[in-house]
Image (cartoon, coloured by chain):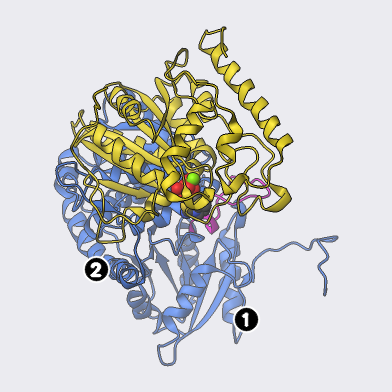
Chain colours: A yellow, B blue
Amino acid sequence: MELSVPDREFMYSGHVACPGCGAAIAMRFVLKALGEKIIMVIPACCWSIIAGPYPMSTLRVPVLHTAFETGGSVASGIKAALEVRGDHETTVVTWAGDGGTFDIGFQALSGAVERNEDFIYICYDNEAYMNTGIQRSSSTPYGAWTTTTPGQDWKKMRKKNIVEALVAHRIRYAATANIAFPEDLINKVKKAKNMKGSRFIHIFSTCPTGWRVPSEMSIKIARMAVQTNIFPLYEVENGVEYTINYRPKGYLVKEYFKLQGRFSHLTEEDLDQIQEMVEEDWKLLLRKAGVFSGS
Amino acid sequence: MKTVMEGSHAVAEAVKLARVQVISAYPITPQTHIVERLSEYCADGSLDAKFLRVESEHSAMAALIGASSTGVRTFTATSSQGLALMHELLHWASGARLPIVMAEVNRAMAPGWNIWTDQTDSLSQRDTGWIQIYCEDGQEALDRTLQAFRLAESVNLPAMVILDAFFLSHTYEPVDIPDQAKVDEFLPPYEPKFLLDPGNPCAFNQLAPPDVYMEMRFSIQTAMQSAIGVLEEIQNDFSEIFERSYGSIEPVECDDADIILVTSGTVTSTCKEVIEKLRSAGEKVGLLKISLFRPFPGEAVRKVLSRTRKVAVVDRNCSFGSGGIFAQEIRSALCNVPDHPLVYGYVAGLGGRDITPELLEDIYWQTKNTDFPELDSFWMGIREVKDGIICSGS
Ligand SMILES: Cc1ncc(C[n+]2csc(CCOP(=O)(O)OP(=O)(O)O)c2C)c(N)n1
Ligand SMILES: [Mg+2]
């Protein structure tokens, strides 16, 4: 298969991400897909640091760094101002972490999507507050160690399903993507760019530092999240039209869990239980997609 | 042309005349009339602005931060709880050097729920880097809103125009609405000094380590201080065009006064009457109205007050554990003046309790008859409360 990844680069070298950072890889692909005419909003997250200190910036697009919980609201204001200035071409893109999206920024995001603000919201999901040192978020998966879910207090709640929450808003477009599937990711970003209204892309982004994995495993682990059905690739249009983009090959979730230090405390029974949870979620997704012969 | 209107609507008229481009707001009593009127103007096309009906005051301010960073003139309005919810973003707006203008209708902070006037909401935001201008009447509310846009855009700092709840926001008074042509002459279209532009990609508000952060803050302080002089020029221009004049402070009968009362907001009008009455009874009393609270016009205040013997500051606010907030500012403006006057602080009218002419007279007499002021502000008209909360140590 021929790769459809554009050559153009909007990320300069010299960013300060950790080795193997999925969020840096995700940014690079997303910018390639979006091209020049964008304005990016970055609420507090690892990328507030990765982009570089004043007066430097590793991004070759205009960036407004903003308060943690304002990804949806600041973008709404930028779009309004662009319209007033007669610029109907520039795409406003919010780039936020899972904490900024699932937790503290959820109200502003929900408000923006309810108003169907014309912008793209991209959440790079590393499943915890990484900037502040690996604290749990509502995106942290069941079973994970973080610095606020240590020892036997490992997280016993499910990961919030952000895509379904936004689908319930009848959002114009919502999709999942993954750094290990760059063509799929780029196609989704391009597709979103050609739409109007609120669009949401949820990108699975490995954090080697926070997940306690070697940096060279970053892509492999991200790929396994899809192959095991832990993070299915799919898209939803107008809150109703589901398309599943990847049919899993039946890998067991424990293969994925066993590679990561953040899950090292889990027993075989825990892993069996998680396997059941993942299967349950997958069946639910198939039902929503109108596919009843799921594996 | 003079029209009888609410203080809230006077602000809305000014916002329309200022040709604001993006408005974002959230309802809260007693501010709501401002944004309701502006919604109508946007709906009927008489104001060509985008109106964002966001889901909270927090998002209202955040949206304006986005819009202002994209180079347009912006406005919002709020009160008490709404202002408090914005707090983090107030710092953000000034730190990002955005000339956002906000009308703030002074309302008491809960609990208990109280929608009436009290300055503690806006004064709690005094260190956020916002210009603060307190208004006395409907005309001043309109005029100050126009001035606020020019001032904010000149020094690249956000500005709050502050109105007393109900006594100003909901009171009908004759207000002169200036001609659009004159306003256009006074307030030209906004020309941003920087903006988000894909043609010139820049990053704003990014990580600022210790080697640059302090200079950034110093530039805010410098801009704030310069706003005192800039406002003076703006006020001169304003009086030439509109034939109405304002100062950062307004002294009344202060030249030979032995005691000067200091007020802000609508209390000033009541106090003007009291001064007149006391003067005709032979009392050497004056009044100093403070309009500009941030930046604090310390020099001007010193000039007026250092000649007098006693200063009585009326505070419709309180910083718990210290006292009236205007009194603190006046004390610190005067403390390095040799032989400075004694400063008496009075807390009065919290949560919308009336500040009557009689109460202001009481303040005058108490000041005259007390040789030395207490360290704390004196609370006027406190009723004895039995069975209050018993605290340890009492
Ligand atoms: C109001 C507020 N609370 C807390 C913080 C501290 N803070 C900055 S980034 C961050 C975590 C961000 O997590 P996430 O959005 O998942 O992005 P990541 O760091 O993982 O990339 C926190 C808690 C803040 N900046 N603002
Ligand atoms: Mg995160």
Q: Is A198 drawn above or below residue B57 in the view shown?
A: above
Q: Quadrant of residue A112?
A: top left
- The verdict on label 2 being within 8 Å of ligand 1 is no
Could one spot residue B20 in this view of the protein? Answer: no
Q: Quadrant of the N terminus of chain B?
A: top left
Q: Position of residue B99 (x, y in %)?
A: 29, 52
For label 1, the crowd category at 10 Å Cα-Cα, with few meaning under 14, some 14 to 19 and many 20 or more, is few
Amino acid bearing label 2 = Gly
Query: At x 26% / y 40%, what residue is drawn?
Result: A39
Disc 2 secondary structure class:
helix
Residue A99 in the magenta stretch? The answer is: no
Q: Which residue is mark 2?
A: B229
Query: At x 60% / y 87%, what residue is drawn?
Result: B371
Q: Nearer the viewer, residue A217 or B213?
A: A217
Q: Nearer the viewer, residue B61 or A200?
A: A200
Query: At x 31% / y 60%, what residue is drawn?
Result: A53
Q: Position of residue B64 (x, y in %)?
A: 35, 43
Stretch in magenta: B106-122
Task: Tell me: B241 left or right of B27.
Answer: left
Could one spot residue A261 in this view of the protein? Answer: yes
The numbered mark 1 sits on a residue in which chain?
A: B
Q: Nearer the viewer, residue B236 or B283?
A: B236
Task: Tell me: B290 left or right of A158.
Answer: left
For label 2, the crowd category at 10 Å Cα-Cα, with few meaning under 14, some 14 to 19 and many 20 or more, is few
Q: Is B333 drawn above or below residue B48 in the view shown?
A: below
Q: Position of residue A84 (x, y in %)?
A: 23, 33
Q: Which residue is mark 1?
A: B374
Q: Quadrant of the C terminus of chain B?
A: bottom right
